[in-house]
Image (spheres, helix red, strand yellow):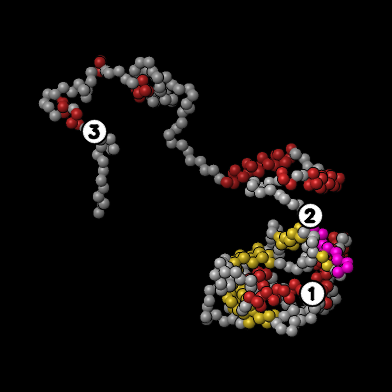
Amino acid sequence: MPLPMVVDGELGMPLDLSQWDCLWEENGDDSELNPDPSRAPKLDPKDQFLLGDPASTPAPFLGASTPGTSTPLASMPHVAWLRKTEYLSREGTSRASLSQDLKQSQDNTIDISRDAQLRDIEASFAAVEDSDLASLRHPTKPELTAVEAFEVFPDSEIWANAYDLFRFSERPGDRPPDVEDPRLDCAVLRPMEADGEHFLAYYLTKEDEDAIEFKRNRLARSPDDPPEEEPTHFHFVRDYETVKIEQEVPNEFLLVLDDGTAYGGDDDEKQPTRPKGAYYKNIERKMLLKKKRVNTYESYGDKWDIIRLTHTPMSAEEMQEREDALAEVADPQYPLARADADADAEGEVDDAAPGVNGHEGHGVGDVNGARHEIVDAVDVFGEE
């Protein structure tokens, strides 16, 4: 059944027929509605183009001196009322800009010789020394100005450590966001697995004093100190699952601004621990975490309610691994030594490989003849 529709019979143009008496009177004078062609009223110049024949000339008409004549506008091109659809794609514009950039780069030849690189490096130091800090401006906040300059160094104190950046979808812990919680910067994240799913168990200390004491002891201890007499208790809070994992983080660093005022040594021979500068350490991975839905029927492989954490001295293998990592920034000959090691490794033959010298070989750490698989971050935390 068709739906009712209100239709305007006058098409939006109201016609008041009561203004013409000839329509209602018998034998009325209809000269107002049907004027004599020989005595036509004077046409307004703005409407004269309506008398032209659009099929005879492609351009619109305007300003004819007499009715029936027209003058085309040369400055107004003829445009078809039904145009062909054209789509603008980002790929097309990017290709055009890329070709233009390549053409400009080909025109500007860059000197990459050793002398040119040394010259550019020396020029960068000279530019920094001659620059005025007050003239520097922030790229996005022009109201900010530079007040002090720092030399940038790798942080040899923490370079041997591997750091991951964890971001939570909401503040962790059991306290409101407006309440300070000193426990959050010494939490424990433990990899877990249940029903083939990998996630992280989150632990915090019960009291603020325990977290403060733990951080104080951690800063005061060296890697070879003996264990503490009393462990620090971390209690289970909840589980978190990974939303996103970035295996490479090239543009985020740990940065420490050191003014060079910290001193070490005896009272008689106190020396600055390190010069003034900005010390950095790269971040290995970045992960985004969100709360994991609690499932009472989920079977945990090994769930802990409390972690008793103590300091354990490093083994000889761990100390050697730490020294090797620290050599990257502490040993000036590290690049040459690494290049030699890579060259030696390419020329070596694995005698323990299967089929070599007529026997089967196994990797280090085999148990019952089975090779242990290397656990990757994706295996532990899952993919994005």
53, 319: nearer the viewer = 319
Q: Is residue 262 left or right of residue 48?
A: right
Gap in angstroms between the C-alphas marked 1 and 2: 28 Å
Residue 151: give its label.
2
Query: Please, what secondary structure does the residue beneath circle 3 have?
Result: loop
Residue in front for this viewpoint, 322 or 102 = 322
Label 2 SS: loop
Amino acid beneath label 1 = Ser
Query: Which amino acid is tagged 2?
Result: Glu
> Is residue 309 toward the left or the right of residue 342 in the image?
left
Q: Which mark is residue 365?
A: none
Q: Is residue 227 above or below residue 79?
A: below
Circle 2 packing at 10 Å, graded few (<14), some (14-19), many (20+), is few
The residue pinned by badge 3 equals 15
Classify the position of the C terminus by image quarter: bottom right
To which residue does mark 1 refer? 222
Residue 231 placement (x, y as % from top left): 70, 82
